[in-house]
Amino acid sequence: MFHDDGFRGLDRQECLRLLARVPVGRVVYTRHALPAVLPVNFSLDADASVLLCTARGSDLVRAIEGVVVAFEADEFDVERRRAWSVIVTGRATVVTAPADHARLSRSGPRSWMPIQDPLFVRIESGMIAGRELGDGAAAASPARRSTAWTRGAP
């Protein structure tokens, strides 16, 4: 269904399918009582949680552990004027169970930054909302669409 603003709302399954296509998104959180946005690479877990890999003791972990955050990923095709955006809102928790940590060490996201002691953060997919602009943006062929577009780090 298209809305008055020209965007079509996406259901949960469409949102998850699109999130699985891109490697980079943004964590939206509060840092020192101000909004902060940080681009990160990620993957989805089997339960539709967003998984991040970062360094133990990082500023990000201290800021988001146990709080509700937003995670956004998108894709734009400027030439065709097509785009989609998905936002996941949920509680961020550090993965502490040894079995889960071992599993994610094998199959979870890898940080693009060199880190000595990786830590996994799970963002529960409590709420997922998405929208698409343009006819067939979600079905654009990989050769015709741009890669994930990200804004700068805080």
Image (cartoon, grey):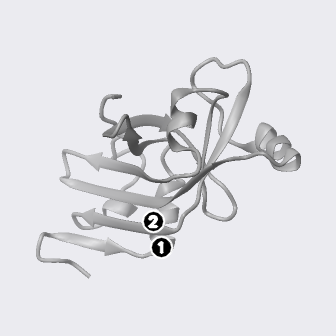
Give the residue type that dot 2 points to. Answer: Cys
Give the residue type that dot 1 points to. Answer: Arg
Residue 42 appears left or right of 4: right
Res. 104 image quadrant:
top right
Label 2 crowd (10 A; few <14 / some 14-19 / many >=20): many
- SS for tag 1? helix
Viewer-closest of 34 and 141:
34
At which x and y percent is residue 122? 63, 50
Report the residue at 30% width, 66% height from top: 131
Determine contact: label 1, label 2, CB under 8 Å: yes
Viewer-closest of 106 and 63:
63
Question: How far, Cα to Cα, is label 1 from label 2?
Answer: 5 Å
Assign the C terminus to one quadrant of the image. top left
- SS for tag 2? helix
The residue carrying mark 2 is 15
Q: Which mark is residue 77?
A: none
Viewer-closest of 112 and 56:
56
Report the residue at 36% width, 66% height from top: 130
Residue 116 appears left or right of 130: right
Viewer-closest of 42 and 115:
115
Determine whether 29 is above or below 126 in the image: above
Report the residue at 45% width, 65% height from top: 15
At which x and y percent is residue 30? 38, 42
At which x and y percent is residue 80? 20, 52
Q: Which mark is residue 12?
A: 1
At which x and y percent is residue 135? 24, 67
Label 1 crowd (10 A; few <14 / some 14-19 / many >=20): some
